[in-house]
Image (cartoon, helix red, strand yellow):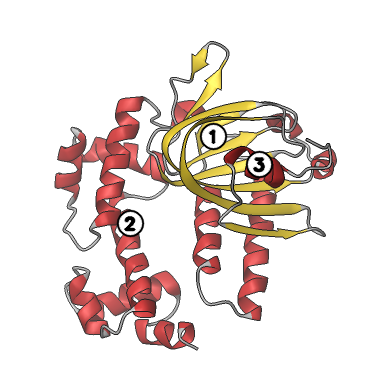
Amino acid sequence: MGETWSNEAIISDVLGRGADIELGAADNGWRLSRWRQFVGSYELPALPDPTFVVHIAGKPRVHTWERDGWSETSSIPGCATIVPAGRPTGWLVDGELDVVTLSISSRDLDAVPMRDQFQRLRFAFADPLGVALTRQVLSELYAPQTPERKVYVSTLVDALKAHMLHGPVAATGASFPTSDFSAYRIHHIMNAVLEQPEAEHSLEAMSAEAGLTPSHFCRIFKRAVGISPHQYVMKARLDRAQELLTASGMSVAQIAEALGFTSQSHFTRAFRAYSGQTPTAWRSATMQ
């Protein structure tokens, strides 16, 4: 491989296909991509630029290669990883890979006070703000594009880059429930919510499924995902509502009932608080 290859070109070559989404800003020194495909294990040669990786969805337990074998710690959706420049890495997925990568120019590190965080692999740590910014970028990219939205997306990614350079240095592996058993249980519950957001998903039922007391489950879930179980369920319902408003002919009342809201007014209030618009206004804006 030539030394001029970008991170994205190297990853594409290893995976055998390009990213689902790619965007970049040469002036601002960043490139953002989403990678989704089924893979087993693979090795990445050293990348020329440091990369911030967000585990979006897909396989619940992804491992990295350590000195003597695959890591005991695993990454689940909601984890972040920093891959330094110049270090080969190995990855075990054995399922669907679904991650977003943000590469930044190595030259931008010259002015970073805490650049030490980019000198080693930081695997599967909790970074709620970084994950939230990444998910917001994706939600905007999959919505109908307008000149204003492009500016907004660029601003969001600039904020994500600034967050990465500032460094989630307070986050440590100890703050995230990364044992295989804990990771699996939380991911299983998250998937159940995403598959059926309209179901009740009470705190009592979810904590029982995890085998934890409700208070302990709330603490573990919020540390892992960045929001409470109730907020996660509500977000899943409102994300599905946005999909239905855009892609179906269902009325607002029908969507509210289908997603388990107690009334249309309850749905409208929640939707406005989440998106800044009423369901009707959202549908009008996205259908233009």
In the shown orientation, is residue 57 left or right of residue 149?
left
Q: Which residue is label 2 attached to?
A: 231
Q: Where's residue 47, x and y in %?
A: 72, 35
Residue 219 seen in render: no
- Between 128 and 256, the one nearer to me in the picture: 256
Amino acid tagged 3: Asp
x and y, in percent, of residue 33 in the image = 61, 53
Instruction: Tell me the element at label 3.
Output: helix
- Horizontally, is 72 left or right of 80 in the view? left
Instruction: Give the left or right position of residue 119, taking residue 207 as reference.
Output: right
Residue 82 lies, in percent from the top left, at 62, 36
Q: How many numbered marks have been drawn onto this rendered protein structure?
A: 3
Q: Choose top left, top right, bottom left or bottom right for residue 159.
A: bottom right
Would residue 144 be seen by someone viewing this image from the given angle? yes
- Residue displayed at 58% across by 77% down: 145
Residue beneath label 1, please?
A: 171
Q: Quadrant of residue 93?
A: top left
Q: Residue at x 70, y 26 (%)?
A: 87
Kind of residue indicated by mark 2: Gln
Image-quadrant location for residue 2? top right
Q: Residues within 10 Å of mark 2 (few under 14, many from 20)?
A: few
Earlier residue among tags 3 and 1: 3
Q: Secondary structure at mark 2?
A: helix
- Which of labels 3 and 2 is toward the front? 3
Kindly check if marks 3 and 2 are in contact, taking CB atoms under 8 A apart as contact.
Answer: no
Which type of secondary structure does the marked residue at label 1 adopt?
Answer: loop
In space, the residues marked 3 and 2 are separated at their CA atoms by: 39 Å
Q: Residue furthest front?
A: 16
| In this view, the mark in front (3 or 1) | 3
Residue that extends furthest to the top in the rendered view of this protein: 68
Q: Pinpoint residue 49: horizontal percent, then vertical percent.
A: 75, 39
